[in-house]
Amino acid sequence: MKATKTPIHAVWSWVRRQPPKVKAFLAVVSGMAALVLLRFIVHDHDNLFVAAEAVHSIGISVLIYKLMKEKTCAGLSLKSQELTAIFLAVRLYCSLVMEYDIHTILDLATLAATLWVIFMIRFNLRTSYMEDKDNFALYYVLVPCAVLAVLIHPSTSHNIFNRISWAFCVYLEAVSVLPQLRVMQNTKIVEPFTAHYVFALGVARFLSCAHWVLQVVDTRGRLLVALGYGLWPSMVLISEIVQTFILADFCYYYVKSVFGGQLVLRLPSGVV
């Protein structure tokens, strides 16, 4: 007797049969619908930013659990963790000197956890580190982010070094996951804990992007003026959107794998 499909599985099966252009259109519509839903159910949209940082912390916790339980760092990108530590350290500095709040505490906790992951990969679990797969050159992102930060940064009353540092961490955060995606592209197979971590990053990026978009909508654009003049306000939004779309493709295959009951995620050629 043929098993009856649930409505969710029926819808998912229909989506999988659609051509790429239709899937892209459905993804955009779903994103917009999620933004509308968040606008009505989350009254204080600053909570979305806090939630994004909390989800990022959860993702790091998943990595720590993987390292402690499986005693291996296979599939993890040390370079992504180093980029994450850099932008968190810079953002923590900016938060301390410019706007000390709850984000400062969350960044401090996430930075501490990230440094612990780096220590484990570099020393305790070095033999399982896939250095040949983690071949993304860091200067490909560090140099452009630094140059862009010098050219385009906030026009607030803060010290010029602090403003450039703020811009640098915004740009670097947007692309910090690229080395991890390169590792997954090279291996084609992503084990569960790494997949959970990257998916958590995708959710965190979406919540952060939603925070900025909804803040702009609610203030009728006044938030962009408050951020300063010139290209900086637009670059903040672009950075948030870019880091969301960078992970969108992976998140699609992650959800597809979960619905298919697969513990190990296998990525087709050309993904990420």
Image (cartoon, grey):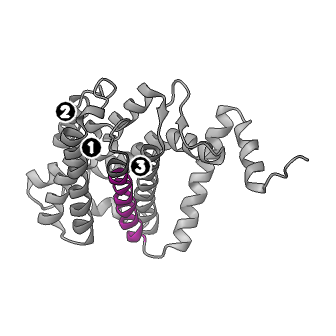
**Residue at numbered disc 3:** 197
Left or right: 27 as drawn, with respect to 108: right
The secondary element bearing badge 1 is classed as helix
From the top left corner, tell me how far across and down residue 231 is, in percent. Answer: 29, 46
Q: Is residue 163 magenta?
A: no
Q: Secondary structure at mark 3?
A: helix
Q: Residues within 10 Å of mark 1 (few under 14, many from 20)?
A: many
Distance CA(mark 1)–CA(mark 3) = 12 Å
Whether tag 1 and tag 2 are in contact, CB under 8 A, the answer is no
> Disc 1 marks which residue?
81
Front-lying residue, 21 or 117: 117
Mark number displayed over residue 38: none
Residue 35 found in image quarter:
bottom right
The magenta segment is 45-65
- Nearest the viewer among 242 and 188 is 188
**Vertical side of 80 occupied by 98: above or below:** below
**Residue 22 locus on image (x, y percent):** 68, 38
Q: Residue 86 at x, y = what percent? A: 19, 46
Left or right of residue 59, residue 35 in this image: right
Q: Is residue 46 located in the magenta-colored stretch of the structure?
A: yes
Who's the residue at 25% across and 48% down the image? 117
Prevailing SS of the magenta stretch: helix
Earlier-in-chain disc, 1 versus 3:
1
Q: Is residue 154 visible?
A: no
| Amino acid type, label 2 | Val
Q: Residue 118 appears at what percent x and percent y?
A: 22, 45
User: Which type of secondary structure does the marked residue at label 2 adopt?
Assistant: helix
**Residue 62 in view:** yes
Q: Which residue is mark 2?
A: 143
